[in-house]
Amino acid sequence: MNDQARSRLLSRILQWTVALTVPVMLIAWFMWDFATALGILCGSALGALNFILLGRSMQKAFANPEEHRGSKWTLPVTMLVKWPLILGGLAIVMLYLPVSPQGVAIGALVSLVGGTTAAMREHRAQR
């Protein structure tokens, strides 16, 4: 998979994430409350950030594979800071925003479904 295909896949993942997040968030707002809807939005945004950081680190690793072989400390910087950034963002969301925890979990799941859907459609298109 070349850089253009990876960028297209990341773009489609983000498109599917947004396309799935908006209706789920609106349904949650009407069925439950604003805190759940905001939690879905924040969880989905954190999931999208995860895909963005993962995509960038994979692009860098595939661009220079010899540079990143061997020690685990030769990983791209985005891979090393990915989890602290995501967990820091999650802590900020949970501590300082009026969100419900189940909304954040649903949002993360929506992002995962968006990523899976985009990857499956891209795989079918390549056949």
Image (cartoon, helix red, strand yellow):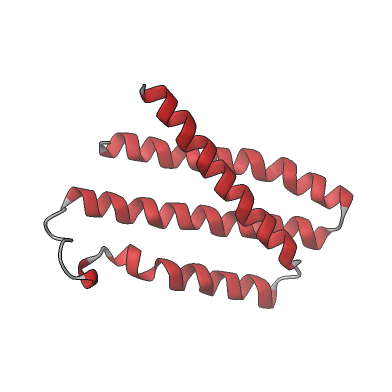
Q: In this view, does 49 lie to the left or right of 4?
A: right
**The image quarter in which residue 77 lies:** bottom left
Q: Is residue 127 left or right of residue 87?
A: left
Q: Which residue lies furthest to the left in this view?
A: 66
**The image quarter in which residue 79 lies:** bottom left
* Residue 99 at x, y percent in the picture: 74, 67
Placement of the N terminus among the 4 image quadrants? top left
Q: Is residue 83 left or right of residue 88?
A: left
Q: Which of 37 and 122 is in front in this view?
A: 122
Residue drawn where x is 43% and y is 30% of the image: 122
Residue drawn where x is 47% and y is 57% of the image: 50
Placement of the C terminus among the 4 image quadrants? top left
Residue drawn where x is 56% and y is 49% of the image: 112
Instruction: Look at the picture and state if 58 lies above or below 121.
Output: below
Residue drawn where x is 41% and y is 30% of the image: 123
The mark total stands at 0
* Residue 31 at x, y percent in the picture: 88, 50
* Residue 27 at x, y percent in the picture: 81, 45
Q: Nearer the viewer, residue 1 or 127?
A: 127
Instruction: Look at the picture and state if 24 lies above or below 1.
Output: below
Q: Residue furthest bottom?
A: 95
